[in-house]
Image (cartoon, helix red, strand yellow):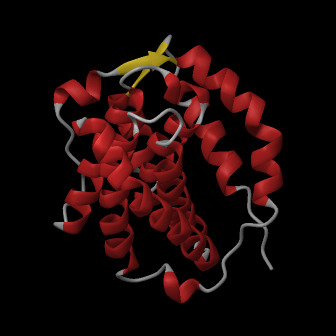
Amino acid sequence: MIKTRDLTNLIDYMCENTQSNKIDFNTLLDSLDARGFGPLLIGPSLITILPSGAIPGVPAICALFIFLMCVQILFGRRHPWVPEKVRNFSFERKTFVKNATRIKPYTEFIDRFIYPRMTFLVRGHSKYLVALLSCFLAISIIILGFIPFAAIIPAMGVFLLGLSLMARDGLLFLISLFFVGVSLTLLPYGLSKLIG
């Protein structure tokens, strides 16, 4: 069993490679793109899960970012394109770093249980299934964003899908399906709130 520090290292990387007072999605994209598809899902989903996700507009922009990434993966695009308005959307770096520092003991604990296993679920063309599921979850984040804290559920699904790819951990992929199922169950209620 090979233990990793994949999650903690990624969060440290996000903090260290965003030096200005604000973090915009252009900086986030540039810093995570070279690390593969998994981190591109983890970054915006983590922002939604953390208290930074309580900032108005942040969950919806994160979801749009995720959706655009995944659609382009499905169509085989190697380098993701994001509209300028999404690229320029920003939030306080200080808030993100503060929250990232606060959760570091938890990410280090989680890292103890993440390692390559059941890799047949997360290799080869599995990224296309992950992209498809993440598209659905991104839409769910936008719809459930009208219910307090409900957007965290699909964001957790995206987070686990990204982490499963990055760590080659098939068990995380299976756990993420639980959040897909819960999101699907909540969607009708979210739609009624949105329409009503």
Q: Residue 30: tell me if it is visible.
A: no
Residue 92 location in percent, x, y? 51, 15
Residue lying furthest top? 21
Q: Nearer the viewer, residue 93 or 67?
A: 67
Residue 165 location in percent, x, y? 51, 68
Residue lying furthest front? 196
Residue 65 location in percent, x, y? 31, 42
191 relative position to 109: left or right = left
87 relative position to 178: left or right = left
Q: Is residue 74 above or below residue 87?
A: below
Residue visible at 27% across and 29% down in the picture: 87
Residue visible at 45% across and 18% down in the picture: 91
175 relative position to 134: left or right = right
Q: Quadrant of the C terminus?
A: top left
Q: Nearer the viewer, residue 172 or 111?
A: 172
Q: Quadrant of the N terminus?
A: bottom right
Residue 173, picture quadrant:
bottom right
Residue 169 location in percent, x, y? 62, 74
Q: Nearer the viewer, residue 87 or 186?
A: 186
Residue visible at 66% across and 56% down in the picture: 6
